[in-house]
Amino acid sequence: MTDEVQNPIKKRGGRPRLPDDVHRTIRREVWLSPVELADLKAKAAAQGLRVGEYMRLVITEARLPTPPVPPINLQAWQVLARLAANANQYQWAINAGKAHAWDRDAIPQLMDAIHTVRLALLGVEADDD
């Protein structure tokens, strides 16, 4: 028996190296005024991105991600969901002949308005179909 110690080759940790055409190795600097920097930071924050990520997407004309929906809009969206459900029940009662005090055309118009407002709260435009 020999006293040789086998040293296994250790693999380097971390992520695999990116291909050269994707690996970012070039850095450029840009001079901004305080107003321009504040505007850049605000636009990046509105998209939920870091400034560098935002700049890269704008420069490459890539599609910007949809901005995050503010929590207050989500709460309003939920309240309007209950209102839409109630309006749907009223429409059902009208169609079943159980409610007579409502204008038959008012509920669909109300539902369309609720739908439009709920989409606007999420930052989505309503289709005009």
Image (cartoon, rainbow, N blue to C red):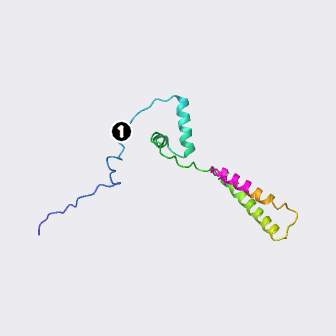
How many numbered marks does the figure carry?
Answer: 1
For the view shown, which residue lies furthest in the right direction? 101
Horizontally, is 8 left or right of 45 in the view? left
> At numbered mark 1, what does the secondary structure look like: helix, strand or loop?
loop
Task: Name the residue located 32 percent from the left edge and 50 percent from the top edge.
Answer: 19
Query: Is the C terminus in the top left, top right, bottom left or bottom right quadrant?
Result: bottom right
Task: Name the residue located 51 percent from the left edge and 28 percent from the top edge.
Answer: 33
Disc 1 crowd rating (10 Å Cα; few below 14, some 14-19, many 20+) is: few
Q: Which residue is mark 1?
A: 26
Rendered location of residue 99, percent (x, y): 85, 67
Stretch of the chain drawn in magenta: 112-129
Tell me if residue 36 comes above or below residue 110 in the rendering: above
Query: Is the N terminus in the top left, top right, bottom left or bottom right quadrant?
Result: bottom left
In the depicted view, which residue is nearer to us: 33 or 117?
Answer: 117
Tell me if residue 89 comes above or below residue 14 in the rendering: below
Task: Name the residue located 56 percent from the left edge and 39 percent from the top edge.
Answer: 42
Tell me if residue 45 comes above or below residue 30 in the rendering: below
Rendered location of residue 112, percent (x, y): 73, 56
Task: Name the residue located 38 percent from the left edge and 37 percent from the top edge.
Answer: 27
Q: Magenta stretch containing residue 122, yes or no?
A: yes
Rendered location of residue 32, percent (x, y): 49, 30
For the view shown, which residue lies furthest in the front direction? 129
In the depicted view, which residue is nearer to us: 101 or 78?
Answer: 101
Q: Quadrant of residue 38?
A: top right
In the depicted view, which residue is nearer to us: 36 or 113?
Answer: 113
Q: Magenta stretch containing residue 95, yes or no?
A: no
Horizontally, is 24 left or right of 112 in the view? left
Which amino acid type is shown beneath numbered disc 1? Answer: Ile
